[in-house]
């Protein structure tokens, strides 16, 4: 409920999670028009597809990490954490609101790309989209709580991680290009990231709607490991923060 | 009946001990003051009582049950307000209160909010953004937030800090009213001795992380025997000074024809009698009894 109120009342949030992502889709859309002329429509569509799906990770992890920062900046975090809401409920609420927002942006972005750039994301198949969205959301949840753990432990001095750290890993996830273009040593690293398998599968789905079970299951299993490690990391950071008094000092 | 029991609560940050084995209890319907100079451990204690900081050792029991193992249940029955926390700045007062009503699982949230808003006379602020309110208005909204779940215990961390005297007085009046009408149980931290004397039933003095004294404000002030006698005279200063010196009294001449004499309360009649017997004309007598501030200063300087 608070997320909805903040989103409605804050230009920054509207810009970060609606306007900026949609603008990215439009910019990359025009790039695809140029690419289609040079390389053909397949590669152009890969770029647009990657840009649209990337928003699922970007918006969901942003919602979890920046959602907490909004409370810190308002000196309201203490009030939230002394309510009977458990950590689990707090994180799930932010993940849910992040997913709803990313679904909305993905839908809007898909409509724009269909009308303006003639790329229909539904060509991937509804079931494929469902699996890809699910896997990307799970990964974003894990990444979001890692950032949240770091903010709880180290305070607002690392707040830029909330909107910046994910882009550091983006090149390794082969969002708009196939893994094969990466240097050999980096390819092995790239396959450790669950989204890499999602984007690879999604690119295949542009031409072939057959469900890429191997990629989907690999991404899901990697996600399970990643989320389990993220939860352990978050709990360790949260407990450490409460032990050293950092959590209570977060609001300055 | 004790609604909060704290036993041997300790918090160490590395080698520094912020709170050192403190034990106390809070009785139902009581306002307990937690006083102490800066760095005495008041805020760390409050943070541990809210679950924001993990104690090094010791236990906290709310309503007879261990806080650590029953955190959610305990938190649903208590609340907190502080001058140092605010609500979400970007959204309106009503939106903030609806969010917290939801987080506390309040039934008929809107009805409950309206009742509290009427009580605190802030109906006109409901649709204002929280960040646009004055400090006094924010304090009142914080109080409403702290009452949304009908808490059995309210922890208040310097709720009047940074308020101007008029608003601070109104806030204290609200707390007094809460005690009278809602039988609120409150743990109250403050630096201001006068407000603690005014609203607290008992006071705990913390110093260097330890409990230095626990008693009612009246009993604590009784422990200081020294009283200040303020005499206004209309005679020769030298005669009065000779009398005070001969009787080995501690005194200081202040302004014109005014002397302050520090003495034990039971010595006051004897001094007045002695002074008048030396043909010194006394035009006014004032006895300044020790205040909680004197207790505070005495404890914090030990």
Image (tube, rainbow, N blue to C red):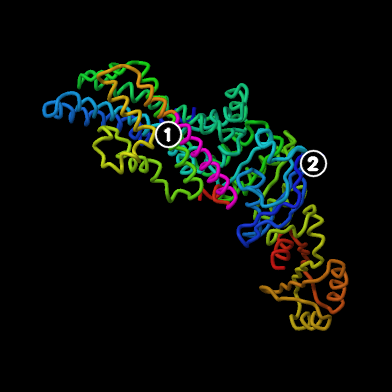
Chain of the residue displaying label 1: A
Q: Residues within 10 Å of mark 2 (few under 14, many from 20)?
A: some
Same chain for the residues under marks 2 and 1 in the image? no
- Relative to B238, is A63 above or below? above
Q: Do the residues under discs 2 and 1 have CB atoms within 8 angstroms? A: no
Position of B53 compared to B293: left or right? left
**Picture mark count:** 2
Q: Main secondary structure of the magenta part?
A: helix
Position of A52 compared to B31: left or right? left
Q: Give the x, y percent position of residue B179.
A: 73, 38
Which residue is disc 2 drawn over? Answer: B2
Task: Give the magenta range.
Answer: A221-244
Q: Secondary structure at mark 2?
A: strand
Which residue is disc 1 drawn over? Answer: A63
Residue occupying image coordinates x 58% and y 51%: A245
Q: Residues within 10 Å of mark 1 (few under 14, many from 20)?
A: many
Q: Give the x, y percent position of residue A32.
A: 18, 28
Q: Give the x, y percent position of residue A97.
A: 45, 27
Chain of the residue displaying label 2: B
The answer to if A237 sits in the magenta stretch is yes
Along the line of sight, the residue nearer the viewer: A108 or A187: A187
Q: Secondary structure at mark 1?
A: helix
Residue B10 position by quadrant: bottom right
The answer to if A184 sits in the magenta stretch is no
- Relative to A178, is B36 above or below? below
Along the line of sight, the residue nearer the viewer: B210 or B228: B210
Along the line of sight, the residue nearer the viewer: A25 or A231: A231
Residue B18 position by quadrant: bottom right
Q: Give the x, y percent position of residue A10.
A: 39, 34
- Relative to B220, is B82 above or below? above
């Amino acid at each position: 409920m608070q997320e909805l109120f903040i989103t409605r009342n804050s230009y920054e949030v509207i810009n970060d999670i609606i306007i900026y992502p949609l603008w990215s889709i439009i910019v990359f859309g025009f790039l695809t028009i140029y690419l289609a002329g040079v390389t053909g429509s397949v590669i152009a569509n890969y770029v647009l597809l990657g840009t649209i799906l990337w928003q699922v990770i970007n918006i969901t992890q942003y919602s979890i990490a920046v959602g907490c920062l909004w409370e810190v900046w308002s000196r309201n975090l203490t009030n939230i954490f002394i309510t009977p809401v458990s950590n689990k409920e707090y994180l799930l609420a932010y993940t849910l609101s992040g997913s709803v927002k990313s679904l909305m942006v993905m839908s809007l972005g898909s409509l724009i790309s269909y009308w303006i750039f003639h790329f229909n994301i539904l060509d991937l198949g509804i079931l494929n989209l469902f699996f890809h969205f699910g896997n990307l959301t799970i990964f974003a949840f894990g990444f979001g709580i890692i950032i949240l753990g770091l903010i709880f432990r180290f305070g607002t001095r690392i707040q830029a991680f909330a909107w910046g750290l994910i882009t550091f890993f983006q090149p390794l996830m082969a969002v708009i290009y196939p893994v094969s273009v990466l240097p050999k040593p980096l390819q092995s690293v790239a396959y450790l990231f669950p989204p890499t398998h999602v984007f690879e599968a999604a690119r295949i789905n542009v031409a072939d709607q057959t469900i890429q079970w191997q990629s989907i299951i690999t991404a899901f299993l990697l996600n399970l490991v990643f989320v389990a490690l993220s939860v352990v990391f978050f709990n360790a950071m949260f407990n450490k923060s409460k032990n050293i008094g950092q959590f209570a000092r977060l609001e300055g | 009946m004790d609604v909060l029991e704290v036993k041997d609560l300790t918090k160490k940050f590395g080698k520094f001990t912020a709170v050192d084995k403190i034990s106390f209890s809070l009785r139902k319907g009581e306002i307990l003051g937690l006083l102490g100079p800066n760095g005495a451990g008041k805020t760390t204690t409050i943070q541990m009582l809210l679950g924001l900081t993990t104690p090094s050792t010791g236990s906290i029991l709310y309503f007879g049950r261990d806080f650590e193992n029953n955190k959610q249940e305990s938190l649903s029955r208590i609340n907190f307000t502080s001058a140092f926390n605010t609500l979400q700045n970007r959204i309106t007062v009503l939106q903030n209160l609806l969010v917290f009503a939801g987080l506390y699982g309040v039934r008929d949230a809107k009805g409950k909010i309206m009742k509290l808003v009427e009580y605190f006379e802030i109906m006109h602020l409901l649709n204002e953004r929280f960040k646009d309110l004055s400090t006094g208005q924010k304090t009142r909204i914080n109080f409403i937030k702290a009452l949304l779940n009908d808490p059995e215990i309210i922890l208040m961390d310097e709720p009047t800090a940074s308020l101007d005297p008029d608003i601070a007085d109104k806030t204290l009046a609200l707390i007094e009213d809460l005690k009278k009408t809602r039988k609120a149980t409150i743990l109250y931290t403050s630096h201001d001795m006068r407000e603690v004397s005014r609203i607290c039933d008992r006071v705990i003095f913390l110093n260097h992380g330890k409990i230095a004294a626990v008693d009612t404000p009246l009993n604590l002030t009784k422990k200081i025997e020294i009283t200040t006698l303020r005499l206004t005279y209309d005679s020769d200063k030298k005669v009065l000074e000779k009398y005070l010196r001969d009787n080995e009294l501690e005194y200081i001449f202040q302004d014109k024809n005014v002397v302050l004499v520090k003495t034990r309360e039971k010595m006051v009649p004897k001094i007045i009698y002695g002074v008048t017997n030396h043909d010194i004309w006394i035009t006014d007598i004032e006895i300044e009894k020790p205040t909680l501030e004197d207790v505070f200063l005495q404890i914090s300087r030990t």
